[in-house]
Structure formats: C-alpha cells, structure tokens
Image: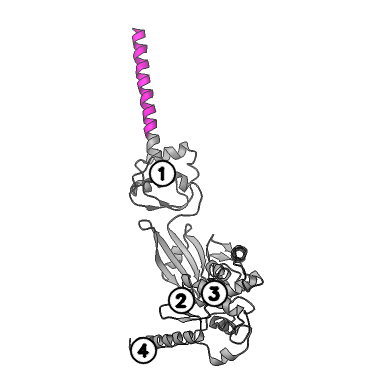
Amino acid sequence: MWRHIVSNFLTVLIVIMVGLAGLAAWAKKQYEGPGPLAQAVCLRVEQGSNFTRVSQDLLAQGAIRSGYIFRAGADYAGKSKDLKFGSYLVAPGASMQEIVDEITAGVPSSCGTELNLRIGVLNTQLILRELDPGSGQYVEKAKFDPAAEARPEGFDAAASKADVRTRVTVAEGVTSWQVVEGLKAADFLAGEVKAVPPEGSLAPDSYEVKRGSDRQKLIDEMEARQGAILAAAWEARASGLPYETPEEALVMASIVEKETGVPGERGRVASVFVNRLEQGMKLQTDPAVIYGVTKGQGILGRGLRQSELRRETPYNTYVIEGLPPTPICNPGRAAIEAALNPDSTRYLFFVADGTGGHVFAQTLEEHNRNVAKWREIEAQQKASGAAN
C-alpha cells in the first residue's frame, strides 16, 4: 500500500513540476513577447515611484497584460531597484522586457515635455512643447520671447518639472553676440560667458543640455563642433579655390549663409562670389555692409542708406577689395560645404526672383533685365500689401 501511495505522490509531484515548468515558460513568453499596445503612449515615471505604481499605469494604458509578470520579470532580471524617473515613449507592441530595460537604463527621457531655447536671427524664443505619442510630432504648448514678452500663465510650473528635457537650438546665420545674449535668457542654464566668441566660430545646431549646465561649457562645445566641421570641409575642398586659409573659407560661408536660405542655391551663390574673387571684382554683398553697421548686435530693421553703401568700412564690400576681415555670422554646415565645394558656373550676378529664391546671370546686361523684373515684382507686392 505504501508503495502505491509513494507512487501516486511522485506522479502528482511530477505533474506539479511539469505544470510549474509550463507556467514559467508561459510567463517568460509573456514577458519577452510582443505586448498588446496598438498605439504609442508616453509613460511618466514620477520621482520616488516604484514598479507597482508603474505596472498599474502601464495596465491602465493597455501596454502590458499582467502587472505581476511585469514586476516579477524586473525582479528576476535584477532591475527592480533601478527604476529611473522620467518620461518614456512606449512603442506599439513593446514587450515588458523592453519597457523594463528602458525605464531602468537611465537614458534621457524619450517623450513628454521639452523646453527649447531657440536663438534665431530675428529673435530668441522659449518654446515649451510636448510629444504626441500617436503622431510622433511635438505640439507647442507655449512660446514667447523672454526678452520682450511676459511669461505665459502656467509656463514656469510646466517648465520646471524634473523630467522636462532642456535644449538650446542655434539657427544658421545668427551672430555670436546673438548667441551669448540668447543664452542669458535661458534660466535653466548657469554661469557666465567669458566673452563673445569670434564671429563664425559657433556651430548652428540643436544641443540637448541638462538643467544647470554651464553656459561657457556650452559655448565651448559649439566652438568645438564648428572647428570639426570646418576642418573636415577644408580637407575635402575643391581644388583651385581663392582661399588661403580655412578662416577665409569661413568668411565666404558666412556670406553664402546670409545671402540665401534656399538649400539648393547655396552652391550657385558660392560660385558667384568665387567667380568675382577670381576676376578681381568687388563682392558687393549687402549682408556684409549691414554687419559693418550693426557689428552683429541685432538686426538693422531697415534698408541700407546710400551713405552707408558709400562709407568705407572693413565690411563694405562695395568699397573694399576681396573678403571682409571676419565672418559676418555663424554659418551652418551646408553653407561651409558650399563655400568649399561651390558649383561650377560662370555666374557673376544674382537677384531675388520674388519666390524666396534668386535668378542668376553671367552678364551685367542680363542681370539688369533681371533686376528690372524684380523691381516690378517688388512694386506689385507693395501695392498688394497696401490694398490689403
């Protein structure tokens, strides 16, 4: 009888063990396999939160099927104590394992709210925006010029949350003075800038920064990036260019940057000025004259006067020969590459065409006809504006 009892017990034990093994395999498959989420969501992990609370949020958003398996999997992986606060984009079909890996990795938040200081040619703006998980696009919540406008109601409370990402974006064509002045408006940065950097030495780009980052260190990073971009472009430059140094090429790039905002035109615009240099012609570029008037401190806000076009300054390219002594802005990578690999053309002139671009000409006669057409377009635009 005892033999029968022992036999039955062993049978039951084996069944239980097999059942437990099957359950473990099923749970592992649930943990590692694709999740039920059909559309991306943003998971916010608060400071001081725990896996129980996170699993409840994920269940509520339909991102996981079992809170217990989610917590048990994190515990088995040794990550249950590694939870990092922040906002995380959970992709459609993300497995529990993938979600655990992301929220314990300590990487910057991948969704949620972002505060961006955008330093532009015309103004500097603080932009608060939030990622829409469904579309993957950012939606602006507030935007204002901190130097000229009052802060929108509720802006500070929304922008000061611990997991808000902070970013500084420098537009192509801004001056070094504008960058320094713009950084002063970023109250999420700290420290002073030692001095206004040399014109052209800062790389227009988007810089993700931590709250409390040092302004001078950010400037140093901008200079390092621009130096690397210029060095690489100089190394890959076309032969026979009228520049003796990378610094001269940077001056040309800054002129190209200010003369056109149309990407496809940069090479042609550069070719015009290269052709002029090679033929001993004056560059006659208005942005350089304007820089001589403003010194890069703000925008002129009006047309150039005849007296300014006649006045001899180091930047008046209607008077001086060759390039001005320094860049007139901080050019972007594309303008630098255009200056060092310009299109091969015979163009010597260009003028606005009324669409935001330019029309190019090889001869003065052709250019004068293009200028006359532009004057007609300009007059029509003014008349239309007055009528409206």
Q: Amino acid at mark 1?
A: Thr
For the point 49% across and 75% down, which residue is it?
260
Q: Earlier in the sequence, mark 4 or mark 2?
A: 2
Find disc 2 in the rendering and name its residue: 149
Q: Quadrant of the N terminus?
A: top left
Q: Amino acid at mark 4?
A: Ala
Q: Earlier in the sequence, mark 1 or mark 3?
A: 1
**Bounds of the magenta segment:** 1-26
Q: Secondary structure at mark 1?
A: helix
Q: Earlier in the sequence, mark 2 or mark 3?
A: 2
Q: CA distance from mark 4 to mark 3?
A: 34 Å
Q: Secondary structure at mark 2?
A: loop
Find disc 4 in the rendering and name its residue: 383
**In terms of depth relative to the viewer, which is nearer, 22 or 206?**
206
Find disc 1 in the rendering and name its residue: 52
Q: Position of residue 32 (x, y in %)?
A: 41, 39
Image label count: 4
Q: Position of residue 245 (x, y in %)?
A: 66, 70
Q: CA distance from mark 1 to mark 3?
A: 64 Å
Check contact, mark 4 vs mark 2: CB within 8 A: no
Q: Position of residue 58 (x, y in %)?
A: 37, 47
Find disc 3 in the rendering and name its residue: 271
* Discs 4/3, front: 3
Q: Quadrant of the C terminus?
A: bottom left
Q: CA distance from mark 4 to mark 2?
A: 32 Å
Q: CA distance from mark 1 to mark 4?
A: 67 Å
